[in-house]
Image: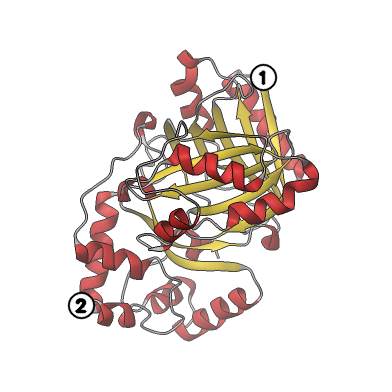
Amino acid sequence: MNLVQNQFPLTTRPYHALGEKLGISGEEVLTRIRALKQSSIIRNLSAIFDTRRLGYQTSLVAVKVAPERLDQAAKVVNKHPGVSHNYARSHAFNLWYTIALPPGHSLEATVERLRELSGGESARPLPTLKLFKIGVKLEMEEGKPPQEETREDGKTIFPDGCAPQAVSLTELDIAAICELQTDLLLTERPFAESAKRLKLSEEELIQVAERFKEKGILRRFAAVLYHRNVGFTANGMGVWNVEPSRIKEVGMQASTFPQVSHCYERPTYPDWPYSLFTMVHSRTVEECDRVIQTISEKIGVSDYAVLYSTKEYKKVRIKYFSPEFEVWEKEHGLAKGLHSVSD
């Protein structure tokens, strides 16, 4: 599981390559991965793209919902094709979801429409202003601390928090993204069918994927695990009230903690003063609290809160370049790119 999260090989026979690293056959690797998927340990195995490099708008959204309406509100939000994650969290803002929209779609109008449809009292879009780190990698060997990360690790930490910019994509690029975003087949040559549909050889498709990695379009090809099922039951979102002049310094410091999978600067509101977000995944709440306390001591910020997820409503990969976005907007009275909140 450590390997498929962190070092999945992009080759024509990836399971065979994994077997060579593990000292077992490719067939045994396939058998183990099938078993892990059937037992809801591995959620999926596919390409993980940088949404903004594809030209999509993304945002975390905090919603305040009457507690008795929370489950129903979550069902409404989950129907939007751009919502990939949706959790109940321990705060007055108790519903938290992430949303991605293709170019030309209004983020503000969509968030407001979802608030109306779900019966939320208020909704606060929290798009990324600076991205210091992204990448969930759970250390599966208990008792072994995850490897500490440094500012030089460009695969997970972006220099100075600079967010990636959108790149131009060809028709072949888009078709390849649609293939690579699907759950990888558990066969000896899992890229063969996708390559055939694209009228490419397997080697050519892998070359496209490697080009995507070089351009920052493809963050990594990896397995995503069911966190709770592998023992990481404490999903704590640490939010920090940081002076604007210290955001860069503090974000860079917090991002070096190996337990922190995501580190962002986000906007503040009169009812939401926290500008820095750090996601911490731990096996227990106590362990998570200790990590957050250590971060607090290192960055010198004492005004913070930890929001624990109390229920997972949705966690999927976004289907990029899907017609479902236009269908949803048409059904709910939003015309592409024409509406704003003031409308």
Nearer to the camera, 25 or 206: 206
Residue name at image x 34 percent, y 71 percent: 179
Which image quarter holds the N terminus?
bottom right
The residue under label 2 is which amino acid type?
A: Leu
Q: Do we see residue 321 in this rendering?
A: yes
Q: Where is the C terminus found, in terms of image quarters?
A: top left
In the image, residue 201 above or below residue 271: below
Tag 2 secondary structure: loop
Quick one: 177 or 289, which is closer to the camera? 177
Q: Is residue 215 left or right of residue 220?
A: left
**What residue is disc 2 on?**
200
Whether residues under marks 1 and 2 lie with C-beta atoms below 8 angstroms apart, the answer is no
Which disc, if any, is residue 303? 1
- As measured in the structure, the alpha-carbon distance from the residue carrying label 1 to the one carrying label 2 is 54 Å
Colour scheme shown: secondary structure
- Quarter of the rendering containing residue 213: bottom left
Residue 80 versus residue 14 in the image, above or below: above
Q: Amino acid at mark 1?
A: Asp
Q: Which mark is residue 31?
A: none
Label 1 secondary element: loop
Mark 2 nearby-residue class (10 Å; few <14, some 14–19, many ≥20) = some
Which residue is located at x 31 percent, y 51 percent? 54
User: Where is residue 150 shown, x and y percent of the image?
Assistant: 44, 37
Graded by Cα atoms within 10 Å as few (under 14), some (14 to 19) or many (20 or more), the crowding at tag 1 reads few
**Residue 162: image x %, image y %?**
35, 32
Residue at 61% x, 79% y: name it. Answer: 35
In the displayed structure image, the side of residue 46 where residue 55 appears, left or right: left
